[in-house]
Amino acid sequence: MYLRKIINQLLYFLKTYKITFIVVITIILSGILTIILIHKNKSIPSITYNNLEVVDCNRLLYATVPVMSQRKLNDDNDTQLLHAQANGLEKIYITNQAFIADSTMLLNQNKLVRLKNNPLYHLKNLTHSYPYVTPEMAQLLSDIGLMFRQKLREKDKDHYRILITSALRTTETQHNLLIRNRNAHSQSTHLYGATVDVTYKEFYNTKTDKTEQNIYPTEALRETMLDFREQCRLVAVREWRQECYHFTVVNCDPAKIPQDSISYVPLYLY
C-alpha cells in the first residue's frame, strides 16, 4: 500500500513536471558529453592538414635506397648518408647566410618544413642547426611523437614530449660543431634536412613546463624508435656520447611504386 502510494506520487510528479524533467535530463547529459569531449581533446592532439602530401608505400620494396627490416638501432653514417642524399636537399648550404637567404623560397616550394613546438614534440636549443626538415621527415616526427604519447598514455604519463636537439645544418654550423665535438662526423647527414637528433636523456614535461629525466618516457621512446626501424620508416643509431637517437627518414620512390598502389598521406602540422 505504501509502495503504491509512492509510485502514484512519482507518476503524478513526472506527469506534472514532464517538460522540466526533460530539460534537466538534457542539461545533465550535455554536461557529461562535454566533459568527455574535453578529456578526449586533451588526450589526442588536434590535427590541421597542410596541402603537402607524402607518399606512403611498402619501403621494403619501394624505398629510394634499399633497406632491410630490423629491430636494432645501429645504422652507421654511410648507410644514413645514402638515405639523406636521396631524400633530402639536392643542394647543401655552405654558409649560414646562404641558407637564411633561401629559407623562405625552400618553404614556399615545399622542399622544407619549419619545425615548431606542438602537442607531439618540442625543440631544445638548436645552437648548431636550424629547425627545418623535409616534409617526409616532418611527417615522421609527428608519427613518432604520436606513438610515443600513445605508449605513455597506457601508464598515465602522456604529459611528456620528445625533445629535438638537432635538425638541418650548414657546412658552417657543422664546422663549428666539429671544433667543439670531435665525435661529430665531417660528412654529416644533417646537411640534407632529412636527419634529426632526438635526446633519450630528458623530455619536456607539459605539467611543469620544464625538461627532466624519467624512466617511463625513456623506455617509451626506445620502443617507439625500434618499432619505426622495424617498419623501415627510418634508419637510426643510438649515440651514447651525445645521448640521442640520430636518425634519417626512409622515403618511398614514386617511380618504383606501381601506379595503382600509390597512396598519399596528408602532412599534418601545427
Image (cartoon, helix red, strand yellow):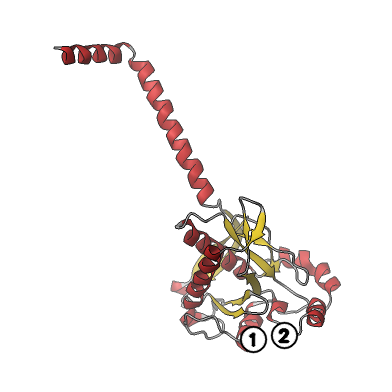
Secondary structure beneath dot 2 equals loop
Secondary structure beneath dot 1 equals helix
* Position of 48 relative to 71 (above/below): above
Q: Is 223 or 83 nearer to us in this picture?
A: 223
Judged left or right of residue 115, residue 1 is left
Image location (x, y in percent) of residue 25? 38, 25
Tell me what residue is drawn at x 69 percent, y 74 percent.
Answer: 193
- Residue 108 quadrant: bottom right
- Residue 247 quadrant: bottom right
Image location (x, y in percent) of residue 128? 77, 72
Q: Which mark is residue 270?
A: none
Q: Are marks 1 and 2 in contact (CB under 8 Å)?
A: yes
Q: Residue furthest left?
A: 1
Judged left or right of residue 58, residue 88 is right
For the N terminus, give its image quadrant: top left
Image location (x, y in percent) of residue 135? 63, 67
Judged left or right of residue 51, residue 33 is left
Question: Where is mark 1, residue-wise?
Answer: 77
Tell me what residue is drawn at x 51 percent, y 52 percent.
Answer: 44
**What amino acid does circle 1 point to?**
Asn
Q: Residue furthest bottom?
A: 78
Image location (x, y in percent) of residue 132? 71, 67
Tell me what residue is drawn at x 82 percent, y 82 percent.
Answer: 179
Question: Where is mark 2, residue-wise?
Answer: 185
| Disc on the earlier residue, 1 or 2 | 1
Residue 112 in sight = no
